[in-house]
Each structure stands twice: as structure tokens, then as C-alpha cells.
Amino acid sequence: MLIAGWLPLAAGAGAVLAIQAAQTSLTRLVDVSHLVYEHAMWVDDLLAFQERCRALQPRRSGLPAPGTVRIITLDDVTFTYPGKDTPALNGISMTLHAGQTVAFVGVNGSGKSTCARLLAGLYEPQEGGTVTWDGVNVLDLDAESLQARVGCVLQDPVRFPFSALANLTVSRGTLTEADPRRALEAARASGAEQVIAALPGGWEALLSKRFRGGHELSAGQWAKIAVARGLYKNAPVLLLDEPTSSMDPRAEHAVYEAVLRDNPRSDQITVLISHRLASVVSCDRVFVFDGGRVIESGTHQELMNLGGEYAAMFTLQADGYRAEAGETA
């Protein structure tokens, strides 16, 4: 256009500068638009995360859970974890009675712990299945009060940076109030009494190295504290999920003797999850899980006579001990 004389030189130079400025501005506009779009995606993720957190909060409406329970019934219970295609539980039905000690056994991923969490009210049944406490659907009960009626002892317990005593009383929702007799009985039954007695400061010893004068415990010692915490809660339902996996054999035997055999309670349902089948021999009923289903149930002797999966697992473990004993001899 300049060569043809359609534009004067000054106008052409101005047009070039205008195009360059516009190109720079357009590039910046595109960059900013991209950032806005990218950040909007993060905001959507944040909002979705917040909504999920709200959905996971305990239900604070409904009837308060009963202080005692005589019968817990699971009827055709199904549960699938988010993002999974295969259900963790598929049509589970069982009835648990007060005064019973029952065991959940099976391979990893068979549904034992998921079923225990449903009993504790941490998960809710899906697809029409029901969990009832004395005939009342748990969905009609206040979730917080229901969870307060369950004592849980997990394989990897929470290590609260509190005093030894507060690590027991926290199960009752307090750090400053304690029932001394109940705390001592729980510590004796779990073997935690010796652990606490060996600490400088005893019951007041701080169980955390993050604070001055604090003490750190071994995994086995923490396991004893966790068992004592569960016993101190004195709940009508006690769930023991591999509670002694980090204990030495003597400590494990003492815990099972104290919790499962020496102090039976007619007003409590005790559920034990364990891979060590020797610990479930004296349980009133054993449920064998596989692929999210209960494939066998009965007493230890009934299941041994059946000659099914439980008998095979028990015999396999027993043969291993016999072989080790023979090699030692």
C-alpha cells in the first residue's frame, strides 16, 4: 500500500505499531483467559471436594442410639467404595447377639473390615440393605450417638500426643475427666499397666517426643494403649481389628485371655477381626468372608467338621507351627 502510494509513510508506520501493540495485547488476553479457565477448574474441584466433605459428616438428626443393644442385624447389606466397580460387600446377612464374641476371618480384601465399619456406623448400607439395632434402622439413628456406642481398636491405632491417662479417656470424649478404677482395669486387661508404670510420671507422662519431656512408645506398646482405650470406652459394641498384630506372642495371648475369655460381658457384642485363627477358636461364632460374601459361619468345631475354607486355612496355619516346632526339636 505504501509502494502503490495508497498510504502516506507516517500512516503506514502508525499501522505497523498499532498491529504490534494489538498482537501483544491479544497474546496477553489469551494467556489471561487460559489462566482464568485453569483456575476455574481448580475452583470446581474445590467446590466438589467441599461438597463431598459435607456429605461425609456424621448425620446429626434422628433418634439417639440406645445405651445398650441386644441384637444387631444385617440384612442383604451391599457396599461399594466410590470409584470401584466390584462391591466390597455383596448381600451380607447376619445376626449378632449381646454376650457374644464373634470373629470375622478371610483373606485380605474379602470384606471383613468393611463389614465392621458398617456395624460401627462409619459406613451406611447401599442398594436397599439394612443394618438394625434392636429392630431400629441405623439410618433413623443419630450417627454421632451411634458411633459413640462403638469402641474400635484398629491395627494401626491413633497415637494421640496426650498423657497416658488422656489417651484412654479420649475414647469417652474427654481429656480432663477420668474414672480411675475403670482406667486401671482397662490398663490391666490390655497389658498397658506395665507400660505406663515404666514411664517417668506414670499416668501423667506425655506420649509424644514433639513436646519437652515427652516419651515415644514402641508399636507394641501403642497397641496395648489402644486396646486399653477401647476397653475404657465401655461401649455396647467392641470392634477389634487385628489389635495385637504388633505385639509379642506373650502380650497377644494375655490380651486375648483378658478380653475374650476372662471377662465376658452379657451386655456387649465383641467382634474380632484376625488372620491368626488360633485367637478365634473360643469365639461363639466365626464368619468366613470371601469376595464380599459370607461363605461359612459357625463355631470353630462346626467349621472344622465342615471341612471347608476355614478348616483349610486353620490347618495350613497349624501345620506351619508344627513344622517350626519339629525343626526346633
Image (tube, rainbow, N blue to C red):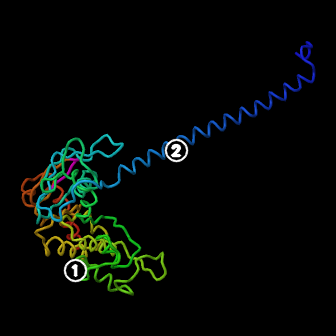
Q: Magenta span: helix, strand or loop, mainly? A: strand
Q: Residue at x 36, y 49 (%)?
A: 55
Q: Does the magenta stretch include residue 45?
A: no
Query: Residue 117: horizontal and vertical position, in percent?
Result: 26, 56
User: Does label 1 or label 2 sit earlier along the sequence?
Assistant: 2
Q: Dot 2 lies on which element?
A: helix
Q: Give residue 221's quadrant in the image.
A: bottom left
Which image quadrant: the C terminus?
A: bottom left
Span of residues in magenta: 287-292
Q: Which residue is drawn at 72% across and 32% down?
A: 26
Which disc is residue 43 wearing?
Answer: 2
Amino acid type, residue under disc 1 in the picture = Glu
Which numbered tag is attached to residue 185?
1
- Secondary element at tag 1: helix
Image position, residue 276 (x, y; %): 22, 63
- Give the label on residue 219, or none: none
Asked if 58 appears above or below 51 in the picture, the reply is below
Depth check: 247 or 239 in front?
Answer: 239
Residue at the (68%, 35%) spot, across then down = 29
Q: In which quarter of the image is residue 5?
A: top right
Residue 45, image x, y percentages: 48, 44
Residue 312 vs residue 299, the one in the foreground: 299
Q: Between marks 1 and 2, how big is the CA–CA gap?
A: 52 Å
Identify the residue at image location x=76%, y=34%: 24
